[in-house]
Image: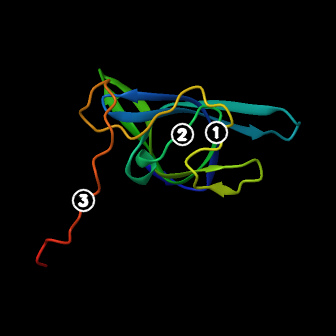
């Protein structure tokens, strides 16, 4: 397991699966000869604060808190990514907390409630703790 932060990635695809939002993200690195190595991270799971935000395909995001880990499934090991905090950024790397900045998004995804299956459900109303005696 490895924790990471400060990584800028391109959103290639936004998916909902069993009530969770998953992103396919693109990453690249410039080599000394001027060429680029490119990677795609499939099914990156959004949890915590990142799971409450809206992301669009083609957005550039900055991940400020995430984790890479290994998971065994059917006798084979897979690399998985969980993202806890992320922000949409512009071309200069400035954060935009206005949900997403894409001018013409293909699909919009909101907050999906875990256990909701493939059916979209709006987020629950915020919990008010005014009536709790402590």
Q: Are marks 2 and 1 in contact (CB under 8 Å)?
A: yes
CA gap between label 2 and label 1 equals 7 Å
Task: Return the mark for residue 127.
Answer: 3
Mark 1 = which residue? Answer: 59
Task: Return the mark for residue 100.
Answer: none
CA gap between label 2 and label 3 equals 24 Å
Q: Are marks 2 and 3 in contact (CB under 8 Å)?
A: no
Q: Residue at x 61, y 31 (%)?
A: 105
Within 10 angstroms of label 3, few (less than 14), some, or many (20 or more) residues?
A: few
Q: Are marks 1 and 3 in contact (CB under 8 Å)?
A: no
Quadrant in the rendering for residue 16: top left
CA gap between label 1 and label 3 equals 31 Å
Q: Residue at x 13, y 72 (%)?
A: 132
Q: Secondary structure at mark 1?
A: loop
Residue 31 in percent (x, y) is at: 81, 39
Q: Residue at x 69, y 31 (%)?
A: 38
Mark 2 = which residue? Answer: 55
Q: Is residue 84 left or right of residue 119?
A: right
Q: Nearer the viewer, residue 92 or 54?
A: 54
Q: Earlier in the sequence, mark 2 or mark 3?
A: 2
Q: Earlier in the sequence, mark 1 or mark 3?
A: 1
Residue 27 in percent (x, y) is at: 65, 37
Q: Nearer the viewer, residue 29 or 86?
A: 86
> Which of pointers 1 and 3 indicates the residue nearer the eye?
3
> Which of pointers 2 and 3 indicates the residue nearer the eye?
3
Q: Quadrant of the C terminus?
A: bottom left
Q: Secondary structure at mark 3?
A: loop
Within 10 angstroms of label 2, few (less than 14), some, or many (20 or more) residues?
A: many
Q: Residue furthest right?
A: 33
Q: Nearer the viewer, residue 20 or 56?
A: 56
| 78, above or below 122, in the image | above
Number of callouts? 3
């Amino acid at each position: 397991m490895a924790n990471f932060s400060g990584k800028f990635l391109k959103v290639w695809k936004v998916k909902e699966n069993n009530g969770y939002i998953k992103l396919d993200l693109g990453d690249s690195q410039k080599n000394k000869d001027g060429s680029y190595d490119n990677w795609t991270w499939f099914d990156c799971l959004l949890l915590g604060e990142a799971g409450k935000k809206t992301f669009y395909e083609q957005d550039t995001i900055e991940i400020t808190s995430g984790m890479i880990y290994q998971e065994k499934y059917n006798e084979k090991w897979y690399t998985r990514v969980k993202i806890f905090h992320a922000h949409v950024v512009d071309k200069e790397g400035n954060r935009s907390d206005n949900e997403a900045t894409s001018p013409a998004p293909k699909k919009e995804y909101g907050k999906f409630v875990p256990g909701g299956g493939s059916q979209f459900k709006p987020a629950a109303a915020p919990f008010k703790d005014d009536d709790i005696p402590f």
